[in-house]
Image (spheres, helix red, strand yellow):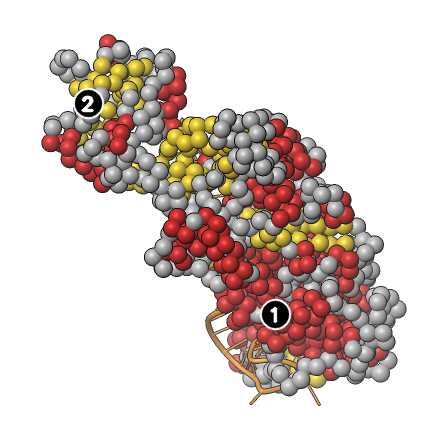
Amino acid sequence: MPDHGERKGYEPRTIERKWYDFWLEKGLFKPEVNPSGRPYCIVIPPPNVTGSLHMGHALNATIQDVLVRWKRMRGARALWLPGTDHAGIATQNVVERELAKEKKDRHQIGREEFIKGVWKWKAEYGGRIIHQLKMMGASADWSRERFTLDEGLSEAVRTVFVRLYEEGLIYRSSRLINWCPRCRTALSDLEVEHEEEEGLLTYIKYPLSGGKGHVVVATTRPETMLGDTAVAVNPADDRYKDLVGRRIDLPLTCRQIAVVSDQAVQMEFGTGAVKVTPAHDFNDEEIGKRQSPPLESISVIGADGRMTAQAGARYAGLDRYECRKLVVSDLKTIGLLEKEEKHVHQVGHCYRCKTVIEPLSTPQWYVKVKPMAREAIRAVREGRVRIIPEGWQNSYFAWMEEIRDWCISRQIWWGHRIPVWYCGECGEVIVSRTTPDECPKCKAAAPDQDPDVLDTWFSSALWPFSTLGWPEATPDLKDFYPTDALVTAFDILFFWVARMIMMGLKFMGDVPFRDVYIHALVRDQEGQKMSKSKGNVVDPLTMVDKYGADAFRFTLAAFAAQGRDIKFSEERVMGYRHFINKLWNAAKFISMNTEGGTAGENPPDDVSDLPSRWVLSRLSQASEETSLALEEYRFNDAANRLYRFVWHEFCDWYIEFAKTGLEDAGQAKDVRRCLLYTLDTVLKLLHPFMPFVTEELWQAAARGAPEGRRSIMTAAWPEDLPRDPEAEERMGAVIDAISAVRNIRGELNVRPGAKVSVIVNAHSEAAARTLGEHLPHMMRLAGAGSIIVGTGPETKKPKKAAVGAMPGLEVYVPMEGLLDMAAELERLGKELGKTDKELAFCLRKLMDEDFVNRAPEAVVAKEKAKCRQLEDKKRHLEDSINRLKGMEVEKENG
RNA sequence: AGGCGCGUAGCUCAGGGGGAGAGCGCUACCUUGACACGGUAGAGGUCUGGGGUUCGAAACCCCACGUGCCUACCA
């Protein structure tokens, strides 16, 4: 007998821990649970070790867990492979902050010590997010958990690097890159966030050498003028035609620069003349390269964001922004500042620390991605990788087609060290998976390893196969690659998904996953992105704590409509907690009334009780639609479908019918079987969404089973349940009749306790028979003391009765003395009004020749049938109203 | 500057060519033997505006307004 105890409702806290431990102990998260099944694999998007669970993770994990639990129940050898990402810059920042508290920096303690410190930090705090995933109920195989800096994964990284280098797809080059002066590292294009800012456009007069006159240039970054090596104008610009080739005395320096021409200069912007600083601006670098001879590149800003010696003694050492102020004031002093204008423009920021990016020229390692991108585009074009919802494909293609080489070296310490060594003697570059003892060329001892590490995304790109054991040919790799689904938010489509597809194709010769499901971003109530700085974050664990993991998961799933962001609302979580409570109490009712019975494996196919046949058929439909929704990644549809069935069909109707059925010795046995079976099935269908409460109820219900049952996790997913359209149709009449009486009671304010007499006039013998067979059910649910059913004069409307009209039947409730004439007239009048309106629409349509001739036959037929029904209904309502009015007159006269 | 998406009940959102759905909230009545985290009944919407396509548009197309996001080197 289920242990519902004395508690009134469901209390998640105690139960969640219990079952999670149970699952772990039984090893149910391992794919070996279904050894003969087909493999199904999802690799988790590895969260940062530094991270703690936020809404995005919670949604992401919920969806993956729904998928993997569902597939497991369908008999798949399901593997959800978890792990974390070393998150180079983020983690290093965290540990550096710790050091700063002790007034130290990493350079003081040295690379080796620092790395040791990071590992120590990781050991201590790095497991937090994993623990939080477990609180969510994640059924990932923790025995296979991976970390991007694990030895195996590092081996994969080195192998990939060396192979790409050998194929000429990795190279080193010195050019402008995005530099974060605070993190002191290069960033890839993707790691730069562009934000609109209001700045100043400063107009500066550049005096022409050896003569009168000047050129005015406009800039948003006046400090870079110290590194200008030209002024460029458009060759087609008549205003400046004569100036090309002239020289300029660059203010605040003792250098002379030339006026050159370049197509890229836009005549309409600013003055049409642009200062060229090849060392600090991507455009200018291009312009510089196009000149012959190429323009000189003078770096005036250093890696720390301060001015270099090349900027001149007055400015060297100043922060770039202080220098900007000083340059402007100096220009003003010497009369070369023309004006400053407000100017809105996009400014690049470091995605980690939000510092303004400084383009700097430094040697970095790059991946030549074009050839790999071509293959990756093809894989999606040909449907070998499906992106769901499809809309994201366009973004994917757009980005991939214009992809530029990927800067992969980072000037930090935490990460995969670049497997490149330089010979101090002969300068030989050694690229190797293992540390070389000597230079292979000149045999000099101990070459120096490149100090840089790789972009974290470089190792993430290998995740779908490196986690499965590559470069070793492990059984897991053979079994689970390509994986089946990748679940992620769009914001790492380029960072991660695209790169995984490229690397998978390159090194495994096959796509890394078949489906990419892109889910929503979770926003706050106002639709703002949640962020710590805005202070609008909702902590998932608070939700779990307040409402239980099941309610929270169900909410996320119900919110997860494709193609739309989620505005999170705590009220919804509360609503779904109520749903779970409803389920809990339904189970309690069933256990109280089934005395240790257990559900059979198969749907009871021999029941005669009509409500039971009805609920089994409704269950079949709900289950089918749920499966279909899951197959199409429509998690919200699946969740809502189940909600509707459980609450509004199973609880509202069937359990209520069952109360009557259980009192009938002839039906009780069937009703019990159906209650148990339906509950059992519903628990299975809900399990992927709410694993804990379903396990609790299922285990409780299984207690009487002969051999006991292992876990709902491995119970078979309900499939191909039988439908019974006849039962559904016949029950429709019963439900309609009850609803009609309830409507009358409600509208006429009949006291809930008061029993009414009911007369049902059915339009068909069949309906009358069905209704006649369910009088006890109807009496209970309609609050009727007596019911007469028929098709003939015996069920004519009595005087002083309220009327309810339904398709196929009318319901009369005699209201001797009870009837409030005015209220009833009002109610009927309202109903008539509604019917009239509907009928008018309907008739108008049918009068329209175009409609009758052009609309599909089925639609016309449907419309005709509807019209007939409405006409019937209208007639009955009018009759009733007239009779009531007649009675009123009688009353007045009498 | 280009691109994508969204605007449906008071709120949060589904839906998607044949006169509109859910949850929460609201109103009335009910401590009815699973559940007040509940029950029954109800109120509430020219589906942002304007054009077009169609027999028929909330849905498809165009424009406008509002709003969110992505991409990009406009000094």
Residue designated by label 2: A254
- Residue that protrudes farthest toward the right in the picture: A606
> In this view of the protein, which residue sits in the foreground, A602 or A821?
A602
- The reply to whether the C-beta atoms of the residues labelled 2 and 1 are less than 8 Å apart is no
Q: Are marks 2 and 1 on the same chain?
A: yes
Write down the residue under mark 1.
A579
Name the residue at 48% across, 50% down.
A112
Q: Position of residue A130 (x, y in %)?
A: 58, 60
| Quarter of the image with the C terminus of chain A in it | bottom right
Q: Residue at x 61, y 39 (%)?
A: A434
Based on the displayed image, in which of its 4 quarters is residue A167 positioned? top right
Q: Is residue A849 left or right of A278 when viewed as pictured?
A: right
* Secondary structure found at label 1: helix
Amino acid of disc 1: Phe
The vertical placement of A211 against A255, above or below, is above
- Indicate whether A630 appears above or below A768: above
- Left/right placement of residue A532 relative to residue A737 reads left
